[in-house]
Image (cartoon, rainbow, N blue to C red):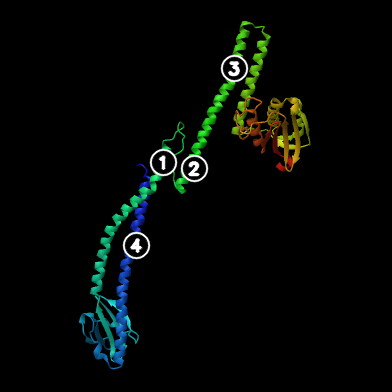
Amino acid sequence: MPPLSFRLRLFLSFSLLWLLFLVGALYLAGRGVERALRGHLDATLLEDARRAAEAYRKGQAGSLIATGGVYLHLYAEDGEPLLLTRPEHRLPREALKGAGETPRVAFQKGFAAAWVRTPLGVVALTQDTAPIDLALAALRRSLVEAFFLLFPLGLGLVYLTARLATRPLEAAAREIAQRSPERLDPVPLTLPQDEFGRMVEAVNALLKALKEAKEEERAFLAEASHELRTPLTVLLGHLDRLARNPLDGEALATARATAERMRRLVEDLLALARGEMGFSLNPHIVDLKALAQEAAREYGVAFGGEEAEVLGDPDRLLQMLRNLLSNGVRAAGKEGVRVRLRREGDQALLEVEDSGPGIPEDLLPHLFRRFARGPGGGTGLGLAIAQAIAQAHGGEIAVESRPGRTVFRVRLPLLEAEG
């Protein structure tokens, strides 16, 4: 059995609510009218009984007998009838035994009665309830007719309400169902800021993120293909030269350099992929000063700083520093690069500064993305890998740049902070 649609479920739910409301309202209306009629009759009989008792006590009983549809009866103390103006309204003796000077009232079959003790005996006033019963029967018929008129009318209104309420959702569902990996454009619906509107906004935000991710993936593949195709073409060309002349030393050296460049590029790609999925770290206590000195000596740049220990993977941290230093050396040469290390609160602050031409302002927000290249060239992967390594160690890299001065600041938690 296929699942019910949301509109049908909404319609059935509101129809049930309408049914319960209508039945309850009509029932309460009928009960209210019945209580009002019987209550009015009770109050009238009690008042008449009180006046009759008072008249009998004052010797004025003759003027109160059988007026306005009210029948007056007189009983002895033991309940024996002395005067019955309407014999079918006779009260049972059990009801009269408890009669006192305060009037009492009760409904009997076909009539209502109020009785009170007087000097002459028990005076009872009765009145037919047939008019009330007829009125209540007519009222019940009217309520049933009202139900069969209002219930289908309410169902129609419920259906229209359900249709109007679910129309935006159905439109959004149709639009979303048309989306696919090849079509990620936003859902073209403008809705108020209610639950439906926020849902469509969330879906549009997700579609936008997926579209951007797909565009980045396409750009990544295009850039990776370009980066690999260029050195591969060069390598194949020099291998062809070597095939014709095995003793061509220049071709062999160029082929080796090209192969090394391709190896580094593939390693960078693999490292970045591992970083996005979570680097596999081998944490140790790392002397960050010694590690920075080693990287500075390797690239022949100046270093100055103080002692700092962090918990991390020394190979990954060294890879991060090498990527930052190679980026600075390409921009400013060895003489224009300086490395500094100091402690700042519970963090180690490592700065790589170069005096190169600077990074264009429009490139700064995207500098740590894959294949985002600065003026110094390169594959555009080194900075992305460096940022991934820093984040894997609970730190981050920030950059500040202007013509003649670019500073990369790496912040890592100190070992004391980790403990």
C-alpha distance separating marks 3 and 1: 48 Å
Which quadrant of the structure image shows residue 381? top right
C-alpha distance separating marks 1 and 4: 37 Å
Q: Residue at x 23, y 71 (%)?
A: 134
Q: Earlier in the sequence, mark 3 or mark 2?
A: 2
Residue 269 versus residue 409: which sits nearer the camera?
409
User: Viewed as shown, does residue 66 lie left or right of 233?
Assistant: left
Whether residue 363 is situated above or below residue 11 in the rendered picture? above
Q: Which residue is mark 3?
A: 232
Which quadrant, please, contains the C terminus?
top right
Between label 1 and label 4, give the one nearer the viewer. 1
User: Viewed as shown, does residue 19 lie left or right of 288?
Assistant: left
- Give coordinates of residue 61: x percent, y percent: 26, 90
Q: Which residue is mark 2?
A: 202
Q: Earlier in the sequence, mark 4 or mark 2?
A: 4
Q: Secondary structure at mark 1?
A: helix
C-alpha distance separating marks 4 and 3: 84 Å
Q: Earlier in the sequence, mark 4 or mark 3?
A: 4
C-alpha distance separating marks 4 and 2: 42 Å
Tell me if label 1 and label 4 are in contact, CB under 8 Å.
no
User: Viewed as shown, does residue 176 lie left or right of 303?
Assistant: left
Q: Say which mark, if any, is on residue 173.
A: 1
- Give coordinates of residue 114: x percent, y percent: 29, 82
- Number of dots carrying numbers: 4
Whether residue 307 is situated above or below residue 128 in the rendered picture? above
Q: Say which mark, if any, is on residue 24.
A: 4
- Give coordinates of residue 386: x percent, y percent: 66, 31
